[in-house]
Structure formats: C-alpha cells, structure tokens
Image (tube, grey):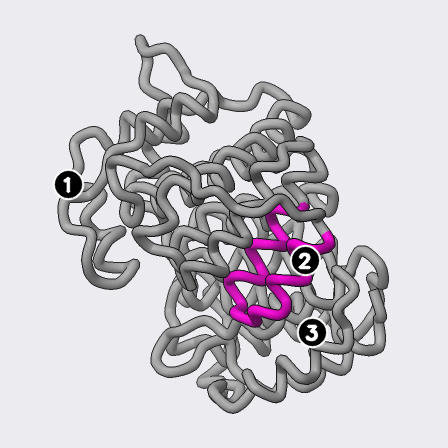
C-alpha cells in the first residue's frame, strides 16, 4: 500500500461528516482504504474528486460527552462523539481505546446499517501497517465516533445470544443461516425493517440457534465461515437488494479484521454480534427463496478487484475487498464471482 496516497485521502475526507443527505453513510474512508490496499492508488484521488461533492461538512459539537451511556445512539451528538474519540486517541494508545470501547459498542452493531463497525474494521486494518500515523488515528476516531452516535442494537440479540435456547440442538453457520425467517413487509428503510423483527415469532429462536464459540480459535473460525457463507448467499439473494445485502458480508468481515487488535476474551462475543448483524440483514432484505448462482466468468483475485475499482461504486469495491479476504482463507473460487455479480446488479 502507498501510505502517502491513503493518508492524503484521509486528510481530504476528515473535513467531511460521517453521513450526508440525512443519514446516508460516508463510504469514502472505507472505499479509499480498500483501493489503496489492493494497489489502485492512482484511482484514489480521482475517485474522491467525484465523491466528495456529495458529502456534508464535519458536524459541530453541542457539549462534551460526560455521561456516555446517555449519549450513546444519539445522532445529534455526532460532533461531540467525534471530538471525544479524537481526544481519547490523542491521549491513549489506540488499542487501549479500542479495547475499552469495542465491548460497549458491539451490542449496537446495527449502527448506520452496520457501517459503524465496517468503518472501524477498515481503520484498524490501516493502522496495522503504521500504528502511530496521525491520519489513521483520526480515521479510527471518526469511525468510533460514528458508531457511537448511531449505536443501534439488533432486536432480540441481547436475550437470544446471552441465553441460547435450552433443549434445542445448536447449529453450525450453514444451518443457522438456512433457518433464518423473513419479515413479511420487505419495504422501507433499514430502521423500519429492523423494527419488524420483534414481531416475527421465529426470529429470536433462529438467532439463538448458532452454536456458541467455546474458545477464541472457534470464534475466529466461526467468523471466517460466516463471511464465506454470507458471500455465497449474496449470489443467491443479492438480486433482491443488491446494495443492502452487501452488508451481510462486509459487517462480519470488519469484525474478523479487528480480532487481532482485541483481547482474545472479546473474540467469542464478537462472533455473536457479527452473526446477529448478518442474520438481521438477511432476514429483512433477502427473499425467502434464493436463485441459482449466476454464471460469471472466472477471474483471478487481482482481476476481480480491478473490475470493482473500474466500476467505482463503493459497495462493489468493499464487497470485492471482503470476498478476496474470504477467498484467500477458503480457496473457494465461487466467492470471487460475488463481486462481479454485485457490479452487474448495482
């Protein structure tokens, strides 16, 4: 990765807010990190030149964060949260800040349609190669601040995941995904759709069906499998909601990428939260019946990402980035077709 190009891009983006046009997520920091990561530095600034015009200015703060629990999930405090984490990351090592706030933020993984955790995952990956870089620390601060401001739980996740249903066999990832119910009215925005989940009788039992991780190693394997299966499910369901179903893949990918920076005691709850996010996005956006995977020309990983970069849509770029990780871990060539399929649909 060319560090200079990414840091220049971050400097341009950090004058902008985490959302625009109401509450659409600013995908810029995530997309440029993926482009730079995969060797497409020359496209970063051209991509930004086109993207920056739609963004809003950095939000102003109202007052300092004192009672963080009361301010959690309050989008009017976005400016305050950005300032809070900027100060925290100037005063403390970033892994310490992340370790303190990850378990606080994780129950609200639905924040910004999961973009809070996704942005954090990209920021953590950028810090892996230069963990004192001020631009990357600022990016992590803005990512954490966005997540805190939009903090939103998955309905029922606290009950289902803390107390898995007794008397029922716990399932692996494949079976648990296959057993997810669907909401009746798949219209409206993500908040309206998530709001329907408490009224779905099978929702909480299905959420509790995933076999809990008994060790950090099991949690990591479970997350890898979740990303893998969610990527394959995109081929079956992506036609119904090409953009929103990308997040069923990219949210658990972000969690998986963050694991190395976390205490291993946090790995199992991280799997549980990522599962809840993927399950929720599937239940509120995927149709009940999938289609046969499309036939897409076989490409190398480099060709897959190059096509996504040429396409230019941030969701296509981020999905390509995620499935390349999953392909590297599993060797499943079918995963690579998901990015091309997203490029056809979006």
Q: Earlier in the sequence, mark 3 or mark 1?
A: 3
In the rendered image of this protein, does residue 45 appear above or below residue 136? below
**Residue positioned 43% across, 38% down in the render:** 293
Q: Is 303 colored magenta in this rendering?
A: yes
Q: Residue 145 location, x and y as percent?
A: 54, 68
Could you tell me if residue 151 is visible in this image? no
Q: Quadrant of the N terminus?
A: bottom right
Q: Is residue 224 left or right of residue 281?
A: right
* Mark whose residue sits in front, 3 or 2: 3
Task: Name the mark on residue 199.
Answer: 1
Disc 3: which residue? 138
> Which stretch is magenta?
302-324
Mark 3 and mark 1: span between their CA atoms?
40 Å
**Residue positioned 53% across, 61% down in the render:** 316
Disc 2: which residue? 97
Could you tell me if residue 122 is visible in this image? yes
């Amino acid at each position: 990765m060319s560090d200079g190009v990414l840091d220049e891009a971050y400097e341009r983006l950090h004058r902008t807010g985490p959302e625009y046009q109401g509450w659409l997520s600013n995908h810029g920091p995530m997309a440029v990190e993926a482009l730079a990561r995969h060797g497409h530095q020359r496209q970063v600034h051209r991509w930004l030149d086109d993207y920056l015009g739609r963004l809003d200015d950095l939000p102003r703060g109202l007052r300092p964060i004192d009672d963080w629990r009361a301010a959690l999930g309050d989008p009017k405090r976005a400016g305050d949260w950005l300032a809070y984490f900027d100060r925290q990351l100037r005063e403390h090592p970033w892994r310490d800040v992340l370790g303190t706030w990850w378990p606080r933020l994780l129950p609200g993984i639905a924040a910004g349609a999961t973009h809070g955790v996704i942005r954090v995952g990209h920021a953590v990956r950028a810090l892996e190669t230069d963990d004192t870089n001020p631009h990357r620390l600022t990016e992590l601060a803005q990512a954490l601040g966005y997540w805190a401001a939009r903090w939103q739980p998955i309905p029922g996740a606290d009950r289902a995941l803390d107390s898995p249903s007794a008397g029922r066999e716990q399932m692996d990832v494949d079976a648990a995904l296959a057993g997810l119910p669907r909401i009746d009215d798949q219209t409206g925005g993500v908040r309206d759709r998530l709001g329907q989940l408490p009224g779905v009788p099978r929702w909480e039992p299905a959420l509790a069906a995933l076999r809990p991780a008994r060790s950090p190693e099991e949690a990591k394997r479970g997350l890898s499998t979740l990303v893998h299966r969610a990527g394959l499910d995109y081929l079956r369901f992506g036609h119904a909601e090409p953009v929103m179903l990308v997040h069923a893949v990219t949210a658990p990918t972000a969690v998986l990428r963050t694991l190395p920076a976390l205490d291993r005691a946090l790995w199992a709850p991280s799997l549980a939260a990522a599962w809840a996010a993927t399950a929720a996005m599937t239940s509120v956006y995927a149709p009940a019946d999938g289609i046969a995977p499309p036939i897409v020309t076989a490409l190398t990983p480099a060709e897959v990402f190059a096509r996504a970069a040429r396409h230019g849509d941030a969701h296509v770029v981020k999905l390509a980035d995620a499935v390349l990780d999953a392909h590297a871990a599993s060797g499943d060539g079918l995963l690579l077709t998901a990015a091309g399929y997203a490029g056809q649909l979006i």
